[in-house]
Amino acid sequence: MKPDTRRRLLSACCIFGFFIAWEVICLAFGISEMVLPRPTQAIYTLVSQFPSIWPHAFQTIYTTLVGLGLGIIIGVLLGMLIGSSKLAYDVAYPMLVGFSSIPKVAIVPILVLWFGAGTVPAIMTAMVMCIFPIVVNVATGLASTEPELQDVMRTLKATKLEILWNIGLPRTMPYFFASLKVAATLAFVGTVIAETVASNRGIGNLMMIASSSFDVPLVFAGLFILAALGVALYIIFSAIEARVTGWAVRNDNFAANG
């Protein structure tokens, strides 16, 4: 068996083993579903109530993807500005650090006042949550570009825009895709926070209603959906990263042998 196949098989066994242990512990100790439902109970609830859960899941997916898309656009533009200008770095970076330190739960009521309850505050919250890691990684990638390469381009009389396009952005791609994996998770967190506070649709709203009615298996079904969506986005971004930045991706065989 190849090392990659053996590693993936071992990973799958560990994941399934975790859920099997969870199931066995709940059965062995007689833990009530009101405290901690078994995985089979959450999956049964997910399957049996899927027609009513799907509209909420679709709303969360839509809101998260729109917010993530806006966050990527704004984050890349700000990262390019900060990474290519020392003045912009000195001015904007402290402001971004201060803004990112504000709990996003405190921002949602302000967004509700501005845009009203519904989808827009959730999109804005998801966008705000994912901007900071993208900005930081893009700016770091631009700042770490080798000066020698820039000097070579200057000797060829290349403009700053040409240097940025031909050297800076390609060198930034590994940092950018690393930030996407973090930003996707944060976008889901922002969406769920906003849906819990200021929306009547979405997984966050569904989980809040389920918890208020003590339907704990439904709450865990919502958690499973969020986890599955996060993993799906992570896999998609990893596949795109391998295609775009294959030269910078770690050699798995080397890691397995190490």
Image: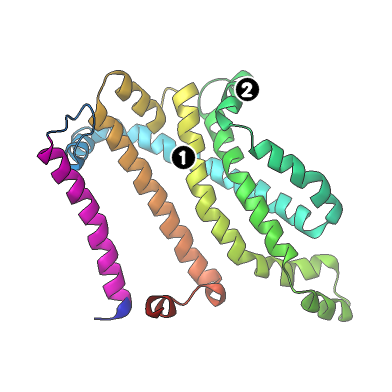
Q: Is residue 202 visible?
A: no
At x 50% / y 54%, what residue is drawn?
181
Circle 1: residue type: Tyr
Residue segment shown in magenta: 4-29
Q: Horizontal and vertical percent for residue 123?
A: 55, 35
Q: Is residue 14 visible?
A: yes
Numbered label attached to residue 227:
none
Q: Horizontal and vertical percent for residue 250?
A: 49, 74
On screen, residue 8 versus residue 83, left or right, reads left
Q: Give the number of callouts.
A: 2
Circle 2: residue type: Ile
Q: Indicate the secondary structure of the residue bearing disc 1.
A: helix
Q: Horizontal and vertical percent for residue 94?
A: 76, 43
Q: Is residue 72 magenta?
A: no
At x 33% / y 38%, what residue is drawn?
223
Q: What residue sits right under mark 2 in the picture?
A: 110
At x 51% / y 43%, what residue is drawn?
186
> Image quarter for residue 211?
top left
Q: What residue sits right under mark 1 in the picture?
A: 62
